[in-house]
Image (cartoon, grey):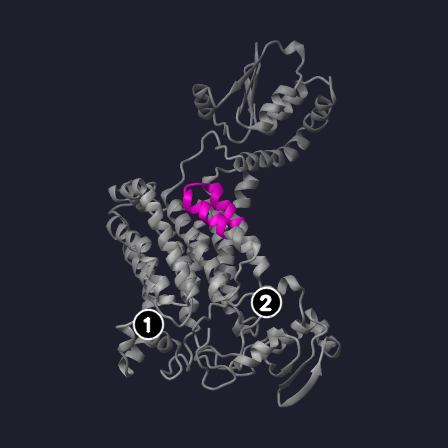
Amino acid sequence: MATHIYYDGECPFCTRYVKMLRLRESLGEIALVDLRTHAEKRAELEREGFDVDQGMVVETEGRRVGGADATNALALMSTPSNLFNRLNQMIFAQPLLSATVYPVLRSGRWLTLFLMGRDAINAEETSQRQILFSFFFGLFSLFHVFNYAFAYDRYPPAMDLIAVFAAALFLLWRPGSSRALFLLMLASTISTIAQAPAQSNHTMLRTVVIVGYWLSFFWAFIRSQPIANVFENFILAGRGSLLVMYVFGIFHKINTDFMDPTMSCAVYLWQDMPAPFSMMGGSFIDYSAIYGTYVVEGAIMLGLLYRPTRYIGLVFGIFFHLFLGLSDYAAYIAFTTLSISMHVLWLDREATDRIGASPEMAFIRTRIQQPLYIAAFLTFLVGGAMAMKGHDFSLSNLYLLPFVLPLCFLILKYGKEGVGVTKEKFSTAAWVCGIAAAGLYFANGAAPYFGLKTAQSINMFANLRLEGGVSNHAVFGNAPGPFTYLNDVAEITEADDSYFLNDYKRRGFAIVYYDLIAHLADNPDVAVSYTMNGQSFTNISAADVQGDIDAMVHHPFIRKWFHFQPVQLERPEPCTL
């Protein structure tokens, strides 16, 4: 009876393995069956319970085995005719060793096929939800680069930002490509590390999104799951992080100074809105802006959680962030586009399938491939970039409308959940990734109340003050603790040859003592004079505070994410970023 080896003909490892293998002549005829070209055999094996994407299947003497058992069987049938066969026998002829090594080789095969752009045998088509997310995440990544280049005055951009820009354009061109999304996540990961520490809250939110993606990716890699599972298991990480953003977006603002119309960031943002909004003022408008923030963000969160109203909550949330971005107070467009991409994750699969199959989407797919529409698309991107370069943040946000308005229309038309539709179920891996990413983001948001980091803690435009042994929060009215990082705050009076410290002095900010000594540790030649806790310190360098540095300052890599906001010592707390 012939021995049959069923393998994946597009897997270079599998093909090379079966060609190099030398089996005993007593086995008779050896039939190599490429399952890519033999659909009937593939279906037969799957009916018997074999997952043909998990490895080869060997049939001999009427018995079929797959995976590690298949490699073990082949090793027992091979001859020690050459070095390869001897090594193969040594490793895979032992059942326990074969079962241990095989998953590693299977994962290597999975990664190789993915990087080579070869689909698994039973690969699923990219979901419409992934396509929508990829488009808006790519759009966000472009504006993230524009943000750093123009709003943060980092022009020309560094190589890591250029890589993000190139990967984002590739993803916008191929939003259905899992490899394009992988490349952008990889470039974004490198850039996140390179650019840290940063003060921007959207950068921390992107970091959590990246963490969720890599958790899902490595789970699929280890288990050799379908590529589509990478995105599907990532969805809850994005959903959970968006909820955490709304929770702390409300909670941080429950403080006396945000509720004070003379200081509230809500009022400041409203006053920098374009006409006619900025023309409307007075106490009623001020208090409406303040308390409306709580109501709107709470309503969006509840709308997302309640399935029948989810599509309305999605559109409401998207428009809310689009509206915030109209304010010229700060460059909000990167946060806006990132939040839009994360709102898309709340669409269930059936809704996105309806959107993808709609005549409107068919029209968009047809037109976007035409030169005229490609030129229009690039014109809007360039227009948004130029508006940011001129610090006209309201105008830059308006360039999003041609991309966002069609999305909102499609969600309202096709996003409503049908009667009797079963609740979408997610795998255990998806829940693990979601809880891990959202839990990390929650800990990041809660950190200031424990006396830990304040930078990038979702406290943008919140008027929150917890430094220097005081608290303006209505719930946590006592000084934060048990950690004491926020207790000591220094006012810079002189700082030779340090742009970083002189910038604090120029802008009238004080600095958390931890950040001050961390800066001195990184720059031992810098000397600084400052006042702290009623005492004056003159010409202090790293050598003078070496004891504090040794006791308090963490490894530089940890400090990329463990750092603090500049401190306004004025009371009440004025609005800052």
- Residue identified by numbered label 2: 562
Q: Specify the principal SS of the magenta part.
A: helix
User: Is disc 2 surrounded by few (<14), some (14 to 19) or many (20+) residues within 10 Å?
Assistant: many
Q: Position of residue 61 (x, y in %)?
A: 57, 14
Q: Position of residue 413 (x, y in %)?
A: 24, 50
Q: Quadrant of the N terminus?
A: top right
Question: Per the image, is 457 magenta?
Answer: no
Q: Where 543 falls versus 441 (above or below)?
A: below
Q: Which mark is residue 221?
A: none
Q: Amino acid at mark 1?
A: Met
Q: SS of the residue at dot 2?
A: loop
Q: Is residue 367 left or right of residue 226?
A: left
- Nearest the viewer among 487 and 45 is 487
Q: Position of residue 328 (x, y in %)?
A: 38, 71
The residue at the point 69 percent across, 79 percent down is 527
- Residue identified by numbered label 1: 273
Q: SS of the residue at dot 1?
A: loop
The residue at the point 38 percent across, 51 percent down is 378
- Nearest the viewer among 526 and 473 is 526
The span from disc 2 to disc 1 (Cα, nearest Å) is: 33 Å
State which mark lies toward you, 2 or 1. 1
The answer to whether residue 484 is seen in the rendering is: no
Asked which quadrant contains residue 271, the reply is bottom left
Q: Which contiguous range is marked in magenta?
A: 165-186
